[in-house]
Structure formats: structure tokens, C-alpha cells
Image (cartoon, rainbow, N blue to C red):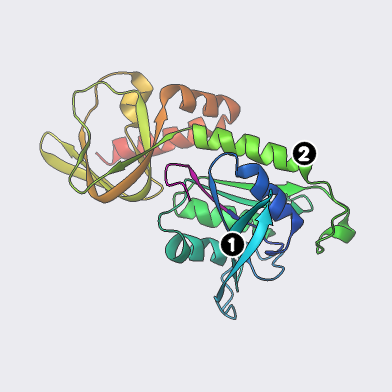
């Protein structure tokens, strides 16, 4: 493994032997180091479940992807459990991106959260890690198979394309315990999303709030371009994604609901003092 490369976790709900998984693995390998941790058996329809009957056994095997030998891992459990085992047991550091798929059969409309593919992405998001769930429309007779009759090439192409956009959307920053992240009064055009660890926000020498994984800070200066309103310090090892103003603007233009969600959080912080 090249430690300088971006770290991607790949999983699915069709199981470790799925051709869709390996199509995604080969496509994503051009973007960074891909760690494959997938359910040992077929887990379609498992959502984000944590079945009590799962044995949690981790199996290691070697497969060939794109002409190269890869060490990959199977997990006795659901896709969401595979994500947990990968983050907390297998990988030395949390990944910068989690990709689930490529699934046999589309996941759409109100039943989307039934999907184990989507459940894996939701589990990653709960840990504050950007995630992408990928499914390909197929005939229903193929949904629980590992048939090689399906051409995953186009889906693999778009998997890599959207993964690249997510990876490029922000720059990972790492801070040590007590290190200053932001300084009150200084200009700033980035907001920060916490991937791991905690951040203390201090205004005029007084701690006013503490943020953890999945939460964000620095949004005020990012939005209005004026000086930072507080100091921010790392508590423990802090991992963040820095999001420049232009990236946030593009995301809001593509998904207008993000603007409302951001306003709700900002309003809540203003009311909370």
C-alpha cells in the first residue's frame, strides 16, 4: 500500500464474490488505495441492520484485480457490519471515502433504505465518512445471482467519476491534540466537516461549544467571507475535510435542499448562543 494515496473502502450487499464488486474495485483503483471488505454471503435487502446471528468472522483471501493480486476481506455479517469491521478492525485509519456496490438491480423510490448497498453507505455516513451507493438496473432474475452476463463497465465508469468528485470536494486535514485549527479574527473561506475526533470552539478565551464526528464548523466565515468569529482547537487527534466556498456553492446548486439544511443548523447555533 502507498500511504500517500487516497484511502477508499469498498463493500457491497451481494457478497465478496460479486462481479459488480470487482468491476468497481478495478475502476476505483485509479483513484487511490482500495480496501475491499464485503459480506461473506448474499445480504440483499438487509438495509442498515445489525443481525444478532452474525458471527462477525473476518476472512482474508487473495484475488486478482486488473492483473494485480489484492488482499481482500470477507465478513460474516451485513454490509453495515462489514463497514464497521473495516473501519474499527481492519483498516489502520478510517477511509476518506466509502463506496458500496455495484449492486445487481436498481435501488430507487421509497424502498431505497431496504437495500444493503444503501445501508452500508448510511453506516459510513453515520461515522462521518463520505459515502456512495451504486446500483445497476438489471432484470429481476439476476438480482440474487453472480451472473457474468451483466456488463458493469458503464456503471464502473460512473462509480469512479462520482467517487473522484467526492474525493476532490474537500481536502483532508489532520490536527494533533491542542493544535489550533482556526484563529478568531483571521480571514477564512473554508468550512470543516469532522471525520474523527473532536473540536473545541473558543470565543474571547471562553469555550462555547464542542463538535464531534459528522458535525461542521467554520461555516460563518465561509458563507460571508468575513473574519473568523472564534478560535478552534483539536481535542485529541482531529481529522477534517476542508470545504472551500466554491465547492459548497456547487453542492448547493446541485442539491438546493442542502441550503435549507445548512440554514437550519446555523439558526440552531444562533438560538443556542
Q: Nearer the viewer, residue 13 or 37?
A: 37
Under circle 2, the secondary element is helix
**Image spot of residue 138 (x, y percent):** 85, 51
Which residue is label 1 attached to? Answer: 72
Q: Which residue sits at x=36%, y=32%?
A: 191
- Describe residue 94's horizontal placement relative to residue 205 as left or right: right
Q: Nearer the viewer, residue 219 or 42?
A: 42
Q: Which residue sits at x=11%, y=33%?
A: 204
Q: Which residues are magenta?
A: 1-9
Q: Compared to 139, does 154 lie above or below?
A: above
**Image spot of residue 249 (x, y percent):** 49, 23
Q: Is residue 156 magenta?
A: no
Nearest-to-viewer mark from 1 and 2: 1
How many numbered marks does the figure carry?
A: 2
Under circle 1, the secondary element is strand
Q: Compared to 56, does 12 lie above or below?
A: above
Q: Compared to 159, does 15 lie above or below?
A: below
Alpha carbon distance from label 1 to label 2: 24 Å
Between disc 1 and disc 2, whose residue precedes? 1
Q: Nearer the viewer, residue 219 or 17?
A: 17
- Quarter of the image where one finds residue 117: bottom right
**Image spot of residue 30 (x, y percent):** 60, 39
Q: Is residue 187 visible?
A: yes
Q: Quadrant of the C terminus?
A: top left
Q: Is residue 113 visible?
A: no
**Image spot of residue 74 (x, y percent):** 61, 68
Which residue is label 2 attached to? Answer: 154
Q: Is residue 3 magenta?
A: yes
Local crowd size for mark 2, using a 10 Å CA cut-off: few (<14), some (14–19), many (≥20): few
- Describe residue 245's horizontal placement relative to residue 103 as left or right: left
In the rendered structure, find residue 252 and report the number of the disc placed on it.
none
Local crowd size for mark 1, using a 10 Å CA cut-off: few (<14), some (14–19), many (≥20): some
Amino acid at each position: 500500500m502507498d500511504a500517500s494515496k487516497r484511502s477508499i473502502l469498498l463493500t457491497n450487499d451481494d457478497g465478496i464474490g460479486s462481479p459488480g464488486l470487482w468491476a468497481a474495485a478495478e475502476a476505483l483503483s485509479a483513484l487511490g488505495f482500495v480496501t475491499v471488505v464485503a459480506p461473506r454471503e448474499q445480504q440483499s435487502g438487509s438495509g442498515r441492520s445489525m443481525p444478532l446471528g452474525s458471527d462477525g468472522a473476518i476472512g482474508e483471501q487473495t484475488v486478482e484485480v486488473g492483473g494485480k493480486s489484492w488482499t481482500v476481506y470477507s465478513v460474516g455479517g451485513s454490509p453495515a457490519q462489514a463497514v464497521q469491521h473495516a473501519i474499527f478492525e481492519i483498516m489502520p485509519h478510517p477511509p476518506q471515502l466509502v463506496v458500496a456496490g455495484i449492486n445487481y438491480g436498481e435501488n430507487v423510490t421509497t424502498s431505497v433504505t431496504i437495500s444493503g448497498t444503501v445501508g452500508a453507505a448510511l453506516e459510513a455516513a453515520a461515522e462521518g465518512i463520505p459515502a456512495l451507493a451504486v446500483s445497476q438496473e438489471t432484470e429481476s432474475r439476476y438480482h440474487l445471482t453472480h451472473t457474468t452476463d451483466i456488463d458493469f463497465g458503464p456503471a464502473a465508469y460512473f462509480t469512479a467519476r462520482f467517487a473522484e468528485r467526492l474525493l476532490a470536494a474537500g481536502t483532508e486535514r489532520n490536527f494533533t491534540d491542542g493544535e489550533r485549527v482556526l484563529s478568531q479574527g483571521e480571514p477564512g473561506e473554508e468550512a470543516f466537516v469532522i471525520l474523527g475526533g473532536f473540536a473545541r470552539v473558543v470565543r474571547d478565551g471562553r469555550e462555547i461549544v464542542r463538535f464531534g464526528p459528522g458535525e461542521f464548523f467554520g461555516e460563518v466565515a465561509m458563507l460571508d467571507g468575513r473574519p473568523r468569529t472564534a478560535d478552534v482547537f483539536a481535542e485529541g487527534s482531529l481529522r477534517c475535510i476542508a470545504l472551500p466556498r466554491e465547492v459548497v456553492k456547487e453542492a448547493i446548486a446541485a442539491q438546493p435542499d442542502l441550503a435549507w439544511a445548512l440554514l437550519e443548523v446555523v439558526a440552531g447555533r444562533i438560538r443556542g448562543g
